[in-house]
Amino acid sequence: MQFILENIINGILMGSIYGLAAMGLTVVFGVLKVINFAHGSLLMVGMYVAYWAVILTGLHPYLALVIVVPVMFLFGYFLQDIIIKPIFKAEKDVREPITVIIVTTGVWYILDNLSLLVFGPQYRNIQDNPLRGKMLEVAGMLPSVPRLWGFFAALLTTVAIYWFFQKTRTGRAIRATSLDREAASLQGINQYKIYNLAVGIGTAVAGIAGVSLVPFYNIFPSVGVLFDIKCFIIVVLGGLGSMGGALLGGLIIGVIENVGAQFMAATWTEAIVYGLFLVFLFLKPSGLFGVKYEW
Amino acid sequence: MKERSIWWKAYLCVLAFGFVCSMAFPVDRPALAQAKEVKVGNILPLSGPSASVGQQSKNSQDMAIEEINAAGGIKSLGGAKITMLYADSESKPDKGVAEAERLINTEKVHVLTGCWNSAVTYPTTAVAERYGIPFIVPVSVADKITAQGFKNVFRIAAKDSWWTRDQFVFLGDLQKEFNAKLSTLAFVYENGDWGKGFAEEWKKLAEKGNYKVVMDEPYPSTATDMSPLVQKIKRANPEVLLLVSNAADAILITNSMAEYKVKPKAIIASGGGHADPSFLTAAGKSARYIFDIVEWEIDVNKPGAKEANAKFKSKYGYNLAGESVDGYIAMYVLADALERAGSTDPAKLRKALAETNYRKGQGMIVGYDSVQFDNTGQNKNASLVMVQINDIGKGMERITVWPKGARRAGYKPVFPTP
């Protein structure tokens, strides 16, 4: 039965990376109350930035974070400031600004096709990085080293974001806006600036997820699409807007995928994941950690 | 602050406008279409999961069309040029069907070609048949595409059942050559039309050859993690692993197998993702010793093949793959048929295509000697070769090993996987 234990470990490692990928989505939703359909594309952009950072500088993939995080933060910040904010302002009297969702879909298509145009359709990965293909050998089991790094990156990121939201002034301002944007504005908080920050943070987290994927994954223009749907499911499982929920949702999906595939065809584990998604929508639409009250 | 943001917007508008203009009116396109032209509608997956291979097909077909046009176009039509109209299927059958309708009704194309993915080609050929427009299929290999009784479908590549047949013949020859006995097989395949078609044939052939099937596993090509699948292969512990994969999953499976140290005695792949040039660069050392069945390899001993590949490589930066070659020769077969038909009338063109016996010309860089279609529209001469991926001092490359007559001089296949 050792293989089940091995699969559970693998599921947890890969699942934490899924959770990390979904975390940016949950941050943006928590504050803007908008599903960011471009999230997968932001992950793709993060992977390309990480890829080029490693290829051009020869850094260790995780040291590339010092480049990826600021670049992605600024990218998200200005994406929100220049493209999404005007739409937000036009729709400011609407509680759930639907046009913003449509705009993020547009951003998704533009980013995917731009990268197809600029980088071409080929699959890239970093052949010579110190993490590639490394496996730990523990008691006959083989956990993957790059995924282990991803696991710790996910934990640290969750803790860091949680700390930032709880303990810093800006973090509190972001939470205030997320609770009630009108009331927050009355306290002198510039809600649009907060939105810029939130999208910036969400994009930077997508960048971190990109970094954790780059050592063992392929990079290609539509890679975001593979993760997109998974991210939505994870976020709904964990509860929209909850960091810990995203991580836990990721772990659940990762473990189902890994353990389930040992007993049935891999096609069926997808069915189980989507089935679970439906069950949650019926029974607990707010997810595991989601808040139930009306915004 | 206010003013600056207005300037920003103005600047972005100008940028966007310039971008749109450059997309809509490429500079090198002649302002007016020529008096006479042959319109070819080409439906390919130019975005989505198969974008990489779709782009390669497009490149090779573009190169062939350029050569044909530069050599004076179709002479029996007064030097008419061939114009290619591309449509993106995104690998989706419904999109392919809709684009075929559009190309036929709105763009008035004379011929259709495409669609790479068998699942897209299958329903799309039905549209062409309904309108009586000839449809040249370079690479979609599902048997059923030419088994519909259609009069307007012509396929260049060898079909599924020939691929699987040759894989098993190779397996037999391998055992004879190395005096080994292989008895357990594992089938792992993408869960689309293509993979399932292969697996069905494999099952029959395994039964006939007295092999024991220890694993029979479809998987979704879009899966983000292949390690569960690889661990399952490890536990099944087959002697031979047969694969059907698209590119992204082929790379992931190969890398994961190296990570988990899964080493069957032989791995036999089925072209597609394994034949994608980016597979070799992205899987690198992990790809070593994989056998792959393909319609063509750059070391094929044919006049013009090296030159065509060199030209292609300098143009697009990577080698021709078997599927690109099928796209390339398909355009020459079309030009040949147009030349003989002397008309763009679909019925006359269909008749000319059916009578095709294309033997020499710039497009004839394939391993076999002529293109001739049987009455289902299948190119009856299409043949296949088996290659092994190995590094013999010049980096990872694909080396032809089977049939023995075509084997690269001085190379002995590595078996079992060390």
Image (tube, grey):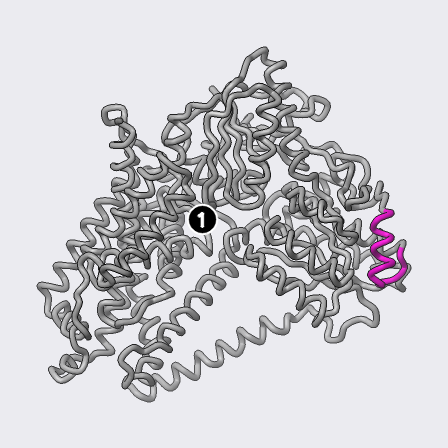
Tell me the element at label 1: loop
Residue farthest along the bottom direction in this orientation: B3
Report whether residue B297 is seen.
no
The residue positioned 17% from the left and 67% from the top of the image is A292
Q: Main secondary structure of the magenta part?
A: helix
- Left or right: residue A114 versus residue B297 is left
Residue beneath the point at 83% across and 59% down: B73
Q: Say whether residue A218 is visible.
A: yes
| Up/down of B170 relative to A71, above or below | above
Q: Residue at x 74, y 61 (%)?
A: B130
What are the residue bounds of the magenta stretch? B341-355
Numbered-mark total:
1
Q: Report which residue position mark 1 lands on.
A: B222
Q: Is residue A58 above or below residue A245?
A: above
Q: x, y percentage for residue A162?
A: 15, 59
In reply to whether residue A228 is colored magenta, the answer given is: no
Q: Amino acid at mark 1?
A: Thr
- Depth check, front residue: B281 or A268: A268
Can you give x and y, in whole percent of width and height, for residue B293 in the image? 62, 33
